[in-house]
Image (cartoon, rainbow, N blue to C red):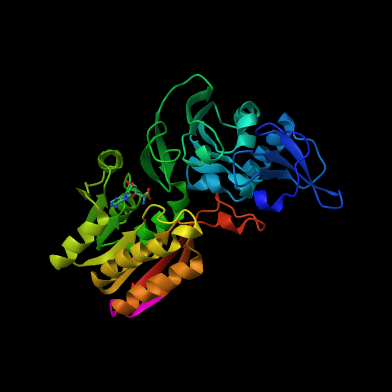
Amino acid sequence: MFSGAIARVDGNPDSGETVEVRASDGALLALAAYSPHSQIRARVWTWDDREIDASFFVRRIEDAASARTALALDEAGDAMRLVHGESDGLPGVVADRYGDTAVVQILSAGAERWRDAIADALCSVPGIECVWERSDADVRELEGLKPRTGLLRGAALKPEHIIHEHGLRFRVEIDAGHKTGFYLDQRDNRLLLRKLSRGKDVLDCFSYTGGFAINALQGGAASVLAIDSSELALASARANAKLNGLPEAELLEADVFQSLRRLRDQARTFDVIVLDPPKFAPTAAHAEKASRAYKDINLLALKMLRPGGFLMTFSCSGGVSADLFQKIVAGAALDAAADVRIERWMHAAADHPVALNFPEGEYLKGLLCRVAG
Ligand code: SAH
């Protein structure tokens, strides 16, 4: 609930305190967590008239876990998103599972107040022995919260984990990696790349620890070039290739915008190009600048694709809608004079659900495009 939608606050609730949200006629609408420092002044825990206590968090986390079990998500491996914030009924709480460890991000004042209950509830998920906190995301600042990281529950302190994803192994550093350590949302799209890669020359832009590149190698790519600006991420990509007994990809520590220009100037061409950039537009206010950046890289990539080649292009920007993203890629194709078809729309994996009343939860959108042969 945005601050502008609130006519009056009775009393002086603490940061994170549970408050009743009432309509102008006094009818109870919801129980919510109060965030005095944020534009989002109240985050709804429940629309029902029930108490918010430790057992509420146990029930919500159990329910999130049973949805994943029902979808047999563990068949893909031992790493998955256990709690996807608002969409699992727990605004401000993200928890990813890496084997026996849950890595949690506590991102709102309400979640902060219930940190212990949330950590305990995560421990009650079968197979979870350890809870590690990675509450160092920028959004905490908007809630007036300081960064916090470290072990919350369990004894084993193992910041490095080896996870399994669709038969491949990846090293995840839960204390130093991005977000909670790994981009679980791209799991199924990485598998899709694997299927497209046999005998192909593949370019993986914004490769991080090599998620896409390793899948291309596993799929029998003739060559893989992976580009990322982070030396640490590329070191992990190298380790991940070795871990799977795969040949090393060609790794380039560089800025993708500049590298794509250089590759174009060298007249390099590829059969498959992956573009998985970071969030260019966190909110709609950044949409225009972000659109230019997306168009730039998509245009360059389309120009370097051979006939019959595939472009796997993504946006994880909340501020760029799926519709706008498709228009940007269409504009890039037009400028590249490329005859392009969308073969598939791609999304985050099913452990990243989207609540119908929170469509913003659908942040990752991807297009699998094919240039006419
Ligand atoms: N595809 C990856 C996730 C990509 S995350 C996976 O499947 O795991 C985005 C990556 O882009 C990060 O690793 C970050 O280091 C990198 N990055 C951000 N800006 C960049 C730039 N301008 N040039 C190159 N890499 C960049």
Answer above or below: position of 103 versus 237: above
42 or 133, nearer to the observer: 42
The residue at the far top in this view is 155
147 vs 141, nearest the viewer: 141
Highlighted magenta segment, given as a residue range: 336-341
Q: In what quadrant of the picture does the C terminus appear?
A: bottom left
Q: Is residue 340 magenta?
A: yes
- Looking at the image, residue 200 sits to the left or right of residue 71; the answer is left
Percent coordinates x, y for residue 361 in the rendering = 57, 54
Question: Can residue 29 be seen at all in this image of the molecule?
Answer: yes
Q: Please determine whether, in this image, residue 317 is positioned above or below residue 131.
A: below
Whether residue 222 appears in this view of the structure is no
Q: How many numbered circles does the render carry?
A: 0
Image position, residue 359 (x, y; %): 60, 59
Q: Magenta stretch: residue 369 in it?
A: no
Q: Residue at x 23, y 55 (%)?
A: 224
Extreme-left residue of the structure = 266
